[in-house]
Image: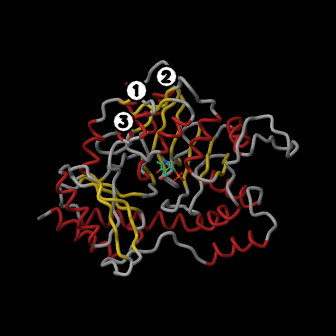
Amino acid sequence: MPVVREHGVTEPTGRLVPVVRDLAKPMSIHLPQWPQAGEREAELLRNVLESEQWGGFHPYIKEFEDSFAAFQHCPHGIAVFNGTVSLELALSALGIGAGDEIIVPVISFISTATAVSRAGATPVFVDVEPDSFNIHPERAREAISANTKAIMAVHFGGTPCRLDELSRICQENNLLLLEDAAHAQGSEWNGRRVGSFGLAGSFSFQNGKVLTAGEGGILVTHDPEFAGRARSIANCGRIPGRSFYEHPILGANFRMTAFQAAVLLAQMERLPEQIELRAANVRLLKNLLADLPELQWQSQPEQVTQNSWYLLSARLQDPPCCGRVRRALTAAGVPNSFYPHPLYKNAVYSRVPCRVMPCPAAEAMVRDSFWLPHRVLLAEEDALHEIARTIRSAVQV
Ligand SMILES: Cc1ncc(COP(=O)(O)O)c(C=O)c1O
């Protein structure tokens, strides 16, 4: 019998219960498929298939690098095969290594931290703001030591971090600002796209992301020197214009394939409209549930001028209530999830060196929060009304 194992549901006890859905049974609330593809993806993929270059030297790679970097308001982009590698590439191009510390938020995907560890440096885990779910600038400031080299800002769910404060803290303390913008294609702070604030911005195009080729990643930057170093490392240590077999730099092969670039170029044409639709549906859901004081949506600082809405997240303050909402959504066939624990509670960090600052906000958040993935926010209006009813009846038992 075909089953799909979606993200698990974290019970209020902290126990992760996997959600196993029988594909033969129709979902009660209709949601659009994700990823979405059409004739444009097929056309560009056919062009690659019919070319004699399926790898990282097809002109689509540069076309995608240039257009995505420009979309994020950056002059340089280095396309790679996923967002984990893109983070690792950024740290490698900066020469981050043993003895260095990088400050990371504890509400994120594991790659934000493991990229630091795999560089040989130490992640320093700091708390998030209880309302925005994003790194708390003051908690980040308190974590700075003589070994700190950078703050890694993660724009959780697509909502930009407090970029003014983080930029100021980095400037005052001679630190680099790096952006893990895996969730935030198209998100803006004061009209400027994320990924363009720090020295480097890293994006993921993994299957569930708002711009996807199944896998993929890119590093964007304003700094031509950093871009050159990163590009060389990602391309076996080669230098543009020099022989194919000259490798003056210690590199690796992180190149994106032409198939990924073809799909991403086509997906970019869909992205602006999808962002608008998600924003409209977020407004609708929030309006439909505006009278529920228990439901506290991820706050949006006034400087957020656009949000990719990769995730629509909320806190319920009350773990049993959160458990009820998540079970009701799951039973209705609506995907929902939340990180089961702050990053430092992953088993890997019982062995791998790290420094952990007090994180009471994140500890509470993992018990009383849930997110709806962006596929839900592309649904028809009827489905959104049904989702709102499902949430309401689980909150108001
Ligand atoms: C915040 C964050 N950083 C990094 C990554 C890693 O990206 P990828 O899955 O493309 O390796 C992800 C992926 O989900 C992520 O959510």
Q: In this view, does 185 lie above or below 232?
A: below
Which labelled disc corresponds to residue 173? 2
Number of numbered discs visible in the structure rendering: 3
* Residue designated by label 1: 141
Q: From mark 1 to mark 3, how far is it between C-alphas?
A: 9 Å
Q: Find residue 136 and name its label.
A: 3
Residue 381 image point, x, y percent: 34, 75
**In this picture, residue 387 sits left or right of residue 242:** left
Name the element at disc 2. loop
- In the figure, is residue 336 to the left or right of 87? left
Which quadrant of the rendered structure holds the C terminus? bottom left
Under mark 1, the amino acid is Arg
- Relative depth, front residue between 55 and 137: 55
Q: Which mark is residue 151?
A: none
Mark 2: which amino acid?
Asn
How many C-alpha atoms fall within 10 Å of the one at disc 3: few (<14), some, or many (≥20)? many
Measure the C-alpha gap from mark 2 to mark 3: 16 Å
- For the residues labelled 1 and 3, say whether their Cβ atoms are less than 8 Å apart: no
Instruction: Tell me where residue 269 sits by quadrant.
Output: bottom right
**Residue 138 placed where, x, y %?**
36, 30
Q: Residue furthest top?
A: 146
Which of the two labelled residues, at mark 2 and mark 1, occupies the earlier sequence position?
1
Residue shown at 59%/46% (left/top)? Answer: 85
Residue 136, above or below 255? above
Local crowd at mark 1 within 10 Å, few (<14), some, or many (≥20)? Answer: some
The percent coordinates of residue 371 (x first, y second) are 33, 57
